């Protein structure tokens, strides 16, 4: 397993053509509307004791010359997509859960790169260029740990299977934070006196399961060199549209621009009649920097009105005046051929969903959990005679 780690990727994307600033104290500014902490930092900023996640005021007090750069999530996505494309260009099938870290299997690539692991790694280094740290091991987690130990440029750390336990033993449990589901576990382990992966690996599975449940068992597997199988990403299908905005556009102007973007995306030939499952709204700010929000639809749809209702509310969170607005399709759904409306006014799916809701309510609270109102004598002068409550019938008796 090969791990590729590119440190400070978000800072590199935000700097763009100004990467010479990495030789100065530089840090990512906080995103508008978020907690006022700095993001990734340059090496000179590290020398002043500044760390990612530090309050802006404290960072500036430690280094008054610190330069804050607005974040660019769109640039990060584009830069990382380019890196993944280079891995695919050498024949790899990468898996990547977050920008800056990718994994791919090397065994199937030996035949096209000289028949050896060294040939595969040489091709990867040529494609990725300087700055990429590469680690090789028997599992994803161990290879990522190896990549973080490759401190010098173009250096590769290889951990043989027989050396896995010895390599992992001195590493801190903070390495487990590379997995989102284990984000808060290292802090708890440190309070309990478990500070290294070696100490964690010596614990029993029963004790970890009793104290932490499934996350504890996963952490134990990682500390002992085991990991889940690789899941390569699907080939991307980039479908996006962008529109320039007039100065100080807001309110209905933004909504009209979004309606136009939705119409353009639905009209793209690349859609091939499929519905849309997940999209992303992004904007470029007048003062620099970008903003991006992914949105997953509850039901895949090709209805512009439904898509608009799901996306419009996010425009209210736009933190600054934007010079352009973009809409990108992140995932497609099944073909947009909903025949239920032609058959029965679109009520079939509604009846099925209603039936499931009624059954769940009755299982939780009994038969009286779902009742309906029946009119008995609507013209009666006594309100209690006008209607009665009756059991609600199952709207879908034959699912």
Image: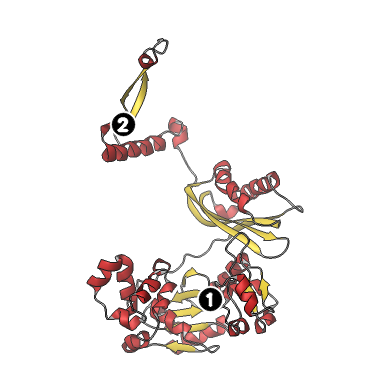
Q: Is residue 340 above or below residue 382?
A: below
Q: Quadrant of residue 377?
A: top left
Q: Can residue 304 be seen?
A: yes
Q: Estimate how packed mark 1 is, as few (under 14), some (14 to 19) or many (20 or more) residues with alpha carbons within 10 Å.
A: few
Q: Is residue 124 left or right of residue 267?
A: left
SS under mark 1 = helix
In this figure, which residue is indicated by the disc labeled 1?
A: 89
Residue drawn at the location 70% of the way across and 57% of the way down: 324
SS under mark 2 = loop
Residue at mark 1 to residue at mark 2: CA–CA distance: 56 Å
Residue drawn at the location 67% of the way across and 65% of the way down: 289
In this figure, which residue is indicated by the disc labeled 2?
A: 394
Q: Estimate how packed mark 2 is, as few (under 14), some (14 to 19) or many (20 or more) residues with alpha carbons within 10 Å.
A: some
Quarter holding the N terminus is: bottom left
Residue drawn at the location 26% of the way across and 32% of the way down: 367
Q: Is residue 192 left or right of residue 23?
A: left
Q: Quadrant of residue 142?
A: bottom left
Instruction: Pinpoint residue 126: horizontal percent, then vertical percent.
Output: 56, 85
């Amino acid at each position: 397993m090969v791990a590729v780690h590119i440190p400070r990727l978000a800072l590199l994307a935000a700097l763009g053509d100004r990467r010479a600033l990495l030789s100065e104290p530089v840090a990512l500014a906080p995103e508008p509307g978020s907690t006022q902490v700095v993001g990734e930092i340059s090496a000179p900023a590290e020398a002043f004791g500044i760390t990612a996640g530090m309050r802006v005021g404290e960072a500036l007090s430690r280094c008054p010359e610190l330069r804050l750069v607005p974040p660019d999530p769109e640039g990060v996505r584009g830069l990382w997509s380019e890196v993944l494309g280079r891995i695919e260009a050498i024949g790899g099938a990468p898996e990547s859960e977050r920008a800056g870290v990718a994994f791919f299997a090397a065994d199937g690539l030996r035949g096209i790169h000289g028949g050896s692991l060294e040939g595969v790694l040489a091709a990867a280094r040529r494609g990725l260029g300087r700055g990429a740290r590469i680690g090789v091991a028997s599992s994803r987690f161990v290879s990522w740990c190896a990549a973080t130990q490759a401190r010098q440029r173009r250096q590769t750390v290889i951990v043989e299977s027989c050396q896995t336990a010895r390599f992992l033993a001195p590493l801190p449990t903070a390495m487990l934070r590379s997995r989102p589901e284990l984000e808060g576990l290292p802090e708890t382990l440190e309070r309990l006196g478990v500070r290294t992966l070696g100490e964690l690996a010596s614990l029993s599975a029963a004790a970890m399961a009793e104290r932490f449940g499934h996350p504890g068992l996963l952490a134990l597997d990682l500390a002992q060199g085991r990991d889940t199988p690789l899941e390569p990403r699907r080939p991307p299908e980039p479908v996006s549209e962008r529109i320039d905005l007039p100065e100080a556009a807001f309110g209905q102007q933004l909504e009209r621009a979004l309606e136009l973007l939705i119409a353009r995306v639905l009209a793209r030939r690349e859609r091939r009649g499929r519905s849309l499952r997940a999209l992303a709204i992004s904007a470029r700010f007048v003062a620099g920097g970008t903003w991006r929000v992914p949105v997953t639809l509850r039901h895949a749809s090709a209805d512009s009105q439904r898509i608009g209702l799901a996306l419009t509310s996010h425009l209210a969170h736009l933190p600054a005046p934007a010079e352009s607005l973009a809409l990108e399709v992140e995932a497609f759904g099944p073909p947009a051929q909903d025949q239920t409306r032609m058959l029965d006014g679109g009520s079939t799916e509604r009846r099925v969903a209603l039936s499931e809701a009624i059954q769940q309510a009755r299982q939780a609270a009994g038969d009286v959990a779902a009742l309906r109102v029946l009119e008995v004598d609507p013209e009666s002068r006594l309100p209690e005679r006008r209607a009665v409550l009756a059991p609600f019938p199952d709207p879908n008796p034959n699912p």
